[in-house]
Amino acid sequence: MTAPIIVWFRRDLRLSDQAALVAAAAEGPVIPVYILDDETPKHRAMGAASRWWLHHSLASLDAALREKGSRLILRRGKCGEQLADIAKESGAGQVHALRHYEPWWRNAERAVAKQLDLVCHDGNYLAPPGSVTTGSGGLYKIYTPFWRALKEQMPPSSPANRPGEIAAPSKWPRSEKLADWGLLPAGPDWATGFAAEWIPGEEGARARVADFVDEAADYDARRNLPSVEGSSRLSPHLHFGEVSPAYVWHRVAAAGGSVDVFLSEVGWRDYAQNVILQFPDYGGRSAREAFDAMRWRTGREADADLRAWQRGRTGYPVVDAGMRQLWNTGWMHNRVRMIAASFLIKHLLIDWRRGEQWFWDTLVDADYGNNSVNWQWVAGTGVDSNMFPRIMAPLSQSEKFDAADYIRQWVPELAHLGDAEIHDPEEAGGRPASYPAKIIGHREARARALAAYDVMKA
């Protein structure tokens, strides 16, 4: 019998438009494998919210494979060691996988390739990272020209159907049990709100795309309004590869209206990967070296302010609503993400990396490229970023983007306030005793941030 072929799943947990699976299924029996490798990423092992999602996504993938007469083999440990063990146990001759660009995954691919015949395919992005180049052949650092060049390569290839048949090996290798991995929270279960919000897996992803198609034309008008369900909410599905960006593109591109604005956000994922391909340590090092001299606040008082921000107790309603939404659902509205991040960095003068790490642990869409690029954009430290002295005013942002109902949903102690009071209840004289006073005044915070910036530049 033909030697089986291993398909190494990572952040590509789908059967449709899965080039590695299609190639392997065309050659012979397939052994689908997922390895929980917390050793190779080290401090970049998945956060708690991502682990919740992973559990349910793997269960969904295994169920889909079983419908095809296959199954998902689970192992825990270093990818290279586990894949070599599976190959030895099963007699597999090759490993097929989709390419990944996070630095730890690139290290893992090199380790696997030293021991096995690794065949990598593209398919997690609109275009392979590194393939969109300048006229001189270099890689783009600025988003706008990158997106302009990427659009010239669009549309992406039509997504491939899932294989009609996935042949099983004559003997299955040993598999661990998903329940034994402890990916779900216990004592207490802080993810009770996640299940009401999300359906992880390929079918849940496709349902989310279908729901969004009818709204995509109005994306630009609705995406900045936290009180309106205006964003696609596809980010965790795209992050875990439950749906390909090519599938999303072909499903929504004809929606008309402002759909191009949404497609540019899909292109931002490609841009973020383009950045970490050039700067693998982007999640932990400011791209602008001048910020190495920034005097971020540290110590007991700064730590207390960080905890207040994490818990949604800053006295700024739109910030607190966002942080509570994050804790309860594993997700935060995009406009509010920018407001909350700016508040931590500039109002509280706390190092952007501490916020990035919190998001890494609490977001179900915690993507290394997107997360680090977005935080450095807000901080002004990135290769393409907002200027540090441009400081968001959270109170006026809240009013401008009509966040009143959003605040009522996530900060229930303010739900009784009218639109005129809810954005700044302290100033309006309507702050209830159960809600904290502002942790710092806006003018005071702005002056402190600009003073620190001036010292850094001196």
Image: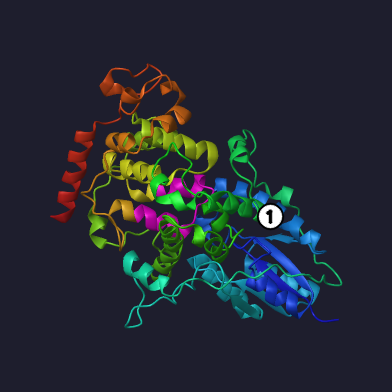
Asked whether 357 falls inside the magenta stretch, the response is: yes
Residue drawn at 55 percent across, 64 percent down? 250
Residue drawn at 61 percent across, 53 percent down? 205
Residue 190 seen? no
Residue drawn at 82 percent across, 67 percent down? 172
- Where 343 falls versus 418 (above or below)? below
In the rendering, at what x and y percent does residue 409 appear? 47, 29
Q: Mark 1 — residue? A: 58
- Occupied quadrant, residue 393: top left
In the rendering, at what x and y percent does residue 400 appear? 30, 37
In the rendering, at what x and y percent does residue 29 appear? 79, 74
User: Coloring scheme of the render?
Assistant: rainbow
Q: Is residue 357 left or right of residue 188?
A: left
Count of marks, rendered view: 1
Comparing 7 with 162, the one in front is: 162
Q: Residues within 10 Å of mark 1 (few under 14, many from 20)?
A: many
- Occupied quadrant, residue 159: bottom right
- Where 104 falls versus 457 (above or below)? below
Image quarter (top left, top right, bottom left or bottom right) of the N terminus: bottom right
Q: Is residue 383 left or right of residue 196?
A: left
Residue 390 seen? yes
Comparing 1 with 357, the one in front is: 1
Q: Amino acid at mark 1?
A: Leu
Asked whether 265 falls inside the magenta stretch, the response is: no
Numbered range of the magenta stretch: 355-376
Image quarter (top left, top right, bottom left or bottom right) of the C terminus: bottom left
Q: Secondary structure at mark 1?
A: helix
In the rendering, at what x and y percent does residue 120 appear? 60, 76
* Magenta region, main secondary structure: helix
